[in-house]
Amino acid sequence: MQHIALYPGTFDPITNGHVDVALRAARLFDFVVIGVYAGHDGAGKHPLFSAEERCAMARQALAGVENVRVDVFTGLTVDYARAVGAQTIVRGLRAVSDFEYEFQLAHMNRHLAPDVDVVCLMTSAQHSFISSSMIKEVAMLGGDITAFVPPHVAQALAEKFSQLRVERR
């Protein structure tokens, strides 16, 4: 039996930290589905990029990784995990501040789907301070984000913020 893992997130946009976790998960599991969440985020986040744009960026960032597929999903993560046959949900931890939220989420998911395990992977030290929100803020203000995201993502952010500046005029 193939061990399938789901790595869910908004990935708005995908960062080098996300790629790091995805590649490490791909080494641990037979197959990894990167689930780009397209629904409303309960944290009140409004994605900068559409689900299709985020999915395309993730696909490009992980191109060539044979045992990884990127898809868009809505609804409960555990329902999507079951739909793709995943026995495990992978989550990334950057700092202690992530732990409490991930701990609560893992217990809720365990309650909803006792047959699906949650595994948290610590982000590599060089990516531990990177968040999509911070990347977007730095990019919006014209800062250099090339060390934190794949080149095509840096380009997409530059184009998106340029477009938004034109629309606001």
Image (tube, rainbow, N blue to C red):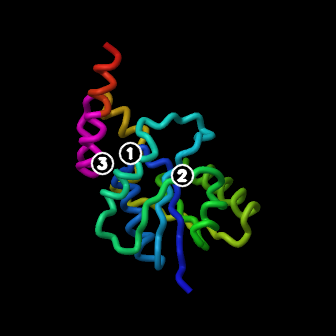
Spot occupied by residue 27 in the image (x, y as percentages of width and height): 41, 76
Query: Can residue 150 be seen?
Result: yes
Element assignment for label 2: helix
| Residue 59 shown left or right of residue 119 in the figure | left
Q: Amino acid at mark 1?
A: Glu
Q: Earlier in the sequence, mark 1 or mark 3?
A: 1
Spot occupied by residue 165 in the image (x, y as percentages of width and height): 30, 21
Instruction: Give the residue drawn at x 42%, y 45%.
Output: 131
Mark 2 → mark 3, Cα distance in angstroms: 20 Å
Quadrant housing residue 60: bottom left
Quadrant housing residue 120: bottom right
| Residue beneath disc 2 | 96
Image position of 44 with respect to 79: above or below: above
Q: Amino acid at mark 3?
A: Phe
| Residue beneath disc 3 | 148
Residue 151 is covered by the magenta coloring: yes
Mark 1 → mark 3, Cα distance in angstroms: 18 Å
Tell us which disc is closer to us: 1 or 2: 1
Q: Quadrant of the N terminus?
A: bottom right
Start-end of magenta stretch: 141-159
Quadrant housing residue 113: bottom right
